[in-house]
Amino acid sequence: VPGLAQTTVEEIEIRGDFKRVAESLIRSTVGLQPGVELSQENVQEAVRALQGLHVFSDIQLYADDSDVGPGVKLIVVVREHPTLEGVRFKGNKEIKEKDMKEAVGLVSGQVVAPKDVARGRQRILELYGDKGYLRASVEGQLFDAEEQGTVFLQFDIVEGDKVRIAEVNIIGSEAIEAGTIR
């Protein structure tokens, strides 16, 4: 927290982009009140508590000592993760869109974070792997939707060729004949 010295919180101000989370929830989650001694530990605890809500992509805390008396004004600035407008798939031929949507598990209206995109990508790769497309590649990208704070998630898929086993060579088996193992 820039401007942090051993001092008392006089006031707390919440700023930023938060449409789905009430200001009162942010205040109570921060856990600091006017009159509390400000320390590096309780600032770190406040950031961890806000991160625990899993709705913010950016969290910043500042101490402003310009005009609040002997203490500081603690300024909490947050930015929410965007809301998912929809999921799109490009390049899929072997797996139905319905099956991929089910595997990805994301629905319109929910908050979408980078970890959700990575998990969706991995689940699509698993679907392709199960069908023998071990060389498939998947990239997930977020695109801004018309409404501010909302995004479309697009998965770009290159299926590649199905992997087939051409030949099995068995080496070193003396107890069992190779034909029996195959």
Image (cartoon, rainbow, N blue to C red):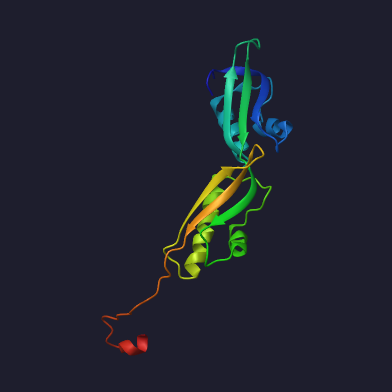
Where residue 83 appears, x then y in whole percent?
Answer: 65, 43
> Can the viewer see residue 102?
yes
Which quadrant of the view contains residue 52?
top right
| Residue 176 appears anywhere in the view | no
Residue 34 sits in which quadrant? Answer: top right
Would residue 63 be found to the left or right of residue 167 on screen?
Answer: right
**Percent position of residue 13, x then y:** 67, 23
Residue nearest the viewer, comparing 58 with 132: 132
11 left or right of 124? right
Q: Which image quadrant: the C terminus?
A: bottom left
Q: Quadrant of the N terminus?
A: top right
The residue at 52%/65% (across/down) is 93
Question: Which residue occupies the foreground of this view, 5 or 180?
Answer: 180
In the rendered view, tell whether residue 4 sits above or below residue 28: above
**Image x and y of residue 145, in percent:** 62, 42
Against 3, is 98 above or below? below
The residue at 52%/67% (across/down) is 94
Please give the name of the residue rendered at 63% of the width and 53% of the height, measured from the top-left corner. 106
Count numbered badges in the picture: 0
Q: In this orientation, which residue lies closer to the viewer: 72 or 8?
A: 72
- Image-based side of 158 in relation to 60, left or right: left
The residue sitting at 29% across, 80% down in the picture is 169
Residue 128 in percent (x, y) is at: 49, 65
